[in-house]
Amino acid sequence: MINSCSGGVSIRLRRDEEGNKNLSSADLSNGPLTGLKVLDMTVAVQGPHVGAFLSDMGAEVIKVEPPGGELNRYARGPGFGFGMDVMGSQQVAMNRGKKSIALDAHSELGQRVLEELIKDSDIFVTNYRSEALERMSLSYEHLRKLNDRLIYGRVSGFGPKGHDANKAMLDGAAQARGGLAAVSGSADGPPMPPGAAIADHSGAMQLTLGIMTALFAREHTGRGQEVNTSALGTMMWLQSWELTHTAMTGITLGRDGQHNPSIASPYGVYQASDGGSFLLAVAMSDESWDEFLVFGGKPELALDSRWNTGAKRIGILGDGDGVVEIRAALREAFKTRTTEEWDIFFKQQPEIIYERVQNYKELLVDSQAEANGYIAEVDVPNYGKTKVVTNVVQLSDTPGLGATLPPPELGEHTSEIMASLGFSPEEVAEVLSPIEAAAAEIIGLVTS
């Protein structure tokens, strides 16, 4: 038996005859991934969010940063008027619950530390470009020689093959190339990417799913493997229905403003008289459709046979005939009532699928989100408590820690990690020595 520490909790592991770590169900009080060690060598959003999920589920996640830290520690953003001693919101959201080791991966000592970490890890996660990984001897072919049980997870912008395999990517670029921007925005305006990092976050989801699949396979084979996905691939996966529809019909779906271009029906966003907005999906029953039209002052539409069934109103049946007219009529209907009046009406109509459009401030206090534990508080150094989105996957028997642990200070766990790997105090001091100066240099660049 050996003892390992994850998040300050002692975990008892047992090894089989081949020396591989195994856990009994009694060991999973911190989550189903308790006992797994993850080496997180990522930047920005798409890579780091993978480690955040694995940490929420109980894994020990060690974030490797350069001596000055990764840039999202210092990212400010709109309204972020705090001093540079407060880490950026992206850092808090993506790296909470992890440990931080800061070292120069290009140095001889840094390479040795990484090699020891690889030997002791179950999962390696990265979103570095392959050419950078090759320079640091961190390709899968190199690391599998150090640890043949290692799950090597990499998410890129455009996939590991092809002429754009090493092309740089930010979220909006993947949304543009991946088709999402083309169907977002007003019908008579330019393409308009959605206002969130959808490609990055969904790329993280797909890589996490791939890593979980590879871990399951390892239980059967005893071997690790390389797992690859990309922001481009994820954008396509998220639009599987729409792309298949285009492939089958030859139709190029275009922008449709407040409506979904794939759904030729009343489905869409409408504005009340005082500016509040609602997404009206469908009135499932004819009675609820009639009551809705009466409330909005358009009772004559109940006689229109083009919308007299739920299937037609959701766009499953029909050829879209009359869709322009019905949407225009519903825009007028919504303008006859205030946001509060529509909200009261809809709450009394369980057969109507709708939601009021919320902004981020409203979502952070949404009672349903709170009831399901989707929001948690973490303590951010030099700031205090803040709300974060926690793990939204819930398991009945082994729920995991969720977002209960704070994001780490730069290099906070360097000494602890290196000592556990057998490095001397002098070697620890050598790794730690450039951190303060390197961080100050980056802050100077960011603020100049």
Image: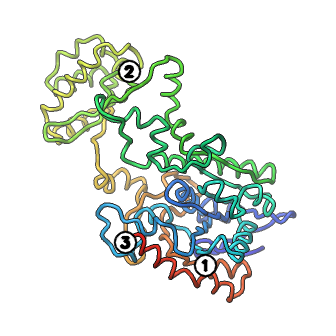
Secondary-structure class at tag 3: loop
Residue farthest along the bottom direction in this orientation: 426
Q: Is disc 1 surrounded by few (<14), some (14 to 19) or many (20+) residues within 10 Å?
A: many
Along the line of sight, which residue is nearer the eye, 437 or 96?
437
Q: Are marks 1 and 3 in contact (CB under 8 Å)?
A: no
> In this rendering, which labeled residue sits more in front, label 2 or label 3?
3
Q: Position of residue 221 (x, y in %)?
A: 81, 49
For the residue marked with disc 3, what is the amino acid?
Answer: Ser
* Disc marking residue 448: 3
Residue 165 rendering spot, x and y as whole percentages: 62, 45
For the residues labelled 1 and 3, the Cα–Cα distance comes to 29 Å
Quarter of the view holding residue 55: bottom right
Say whether disc 2 or disc 3 marks the residue closer to the N-terminus: 2
- Along the viewing direction, whichever of 252 and 167 lies nearer the viewer: 167
Please give the name of the residue rendered at 21% of the width and 23% of the height, measured from the top-left corner: 328
Q: Nearer the viewer, residue 216 or 168?
A: 168
Residue type marked 1: Thr
Q: What residue sits right under mark 1 in the picture?
A: 414
- 65 versus 189 height, above or below: below
Mark 1–mark 2 distance (CA, rounded to whole Å): 57 Å
Identify the image's colour scheme: rainbow, by chain, secondary structure or one colour: rainbow
- Residue type at the position of mark 2: Gly
**Is 110 left or right of 246, judged from the image as shown?**
right
Residue 64, image x, y percentages: 60, 69
For the residue pair 352 and 44, the one nearer the viewer reads as 44
Instruction: Identify whether 300 is placed above or below 279.
Output: above
Contact between marks 2 and 3 (CB within 8 A): the answer is no
The Cα atoms of the two marked residues, 2 and 3, are separated by 54 Å
Q: Is residue 351 visible?
A: no
Between discs 1 and 3, the one toward the N terminus? 1
